[in-house]
Amino acid sequence: MNRRFFMAGSVSALLATPAMADVAGADDFDSAELPDYTHLLGPAGMTPQGLATPLPREVAMARDIMAQAPRTSPHEIMAWLEALRETNQDGERYNEGWRDRWNPLIVGFFAGTGLTPSGDLTPWCAACINWCIERAGLKGTGSASSGSFRNPRGPGRPRLGDVAVFRDDARGPGKGHVGFYVGGDTRRITVLGANQLNERGHHGICRKPYAVRSGRLVLDSFHPVTEGGRESP
């Protein structure tokens, strides 16, 4: 499901401010100020979901979460994000979309990888995947488009932690969804990913089963993250 982007003129100023709390032992990336987000906001200066900017303490919490994330395998990092229970003052978790304010952790996935939304501002599934890959010290695709993970070799036989790439032909070239493969069979696979509907009714980071050959999304391929970047044909 697409996350539409809305106007918020103060986003750049807020997110460019220093964190309110330093994280002991954080490396240069973790402790650095979040960069100016202007380059990723689109031509009108837009931000994900809610119209309101997050509270300063919510921005600080998002920074802390990113700094404390493990540096294990990409799918283990995603599992760590899935297990987050920290909430904002409205009881909304940091690993899911918020109703009234945009979630600074989600925006951080774009800024932390230097990715720029493209097309109709592809939702945050690919940005989160790339952030986990780069957090693990591997090379991502360098794109916020789910289509950037497509493997010309086709589905093949997946391994735990490979990126499952779905296409949505109805929405046009390059559109679809991505998530880490964590199990399944020839008919249905379980994907650990972002921007997926969770048990709380939010689009967040969770595990979800997807049919391989039915429904709007169709399994296109598996992308081995251990090789990094886009595979050659």
Image (spheres, rainbow, N blue to C red):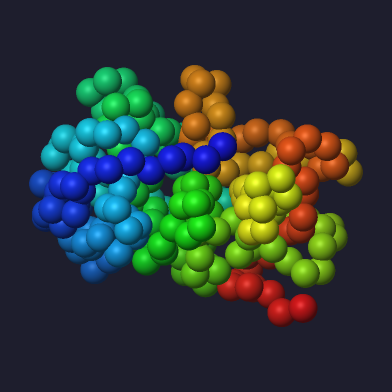
Q: Image point 61% across, 35% down: which residue?
A: 207
**Residue 56 x %, y %:** 14, 39
**Residue 120 x %, y %:** 50, 52
Q: Image point 61% across, 64% down: which residue?
A: 148
- In the image, 196 versus 159, the foreground residue is 196
**Residue 82 x %, y %:** 49, 37
Query: Where 163 falls versus 99 (above or below)?
Result: below
Q: Indicate the quadrant where residue 52 lies.
A: top left
**Residue 68 x %, y %:** 32, 50
Q: Would residue 224 be seen by someone viewing this image from the given angle?
A: yes
Q: Would residue 73 be seen by someone viewing this image from the given angle?
A: no
Q: Indicate the quadrant where residue 220 lies.
A: bottom right
Quadrant housing the N terminus:
top right
Q: Indicate the quadrant where residue 105 lies.
A: top left
Horizontal side, residue 180 vs residue 19: left or right = right
Query: Where 62 falls versus 113 (above or below)?
Result: above
- In the image, 113 versus 39, the foreground residue is 39
Quadrant housing the C terminus:
bottom right
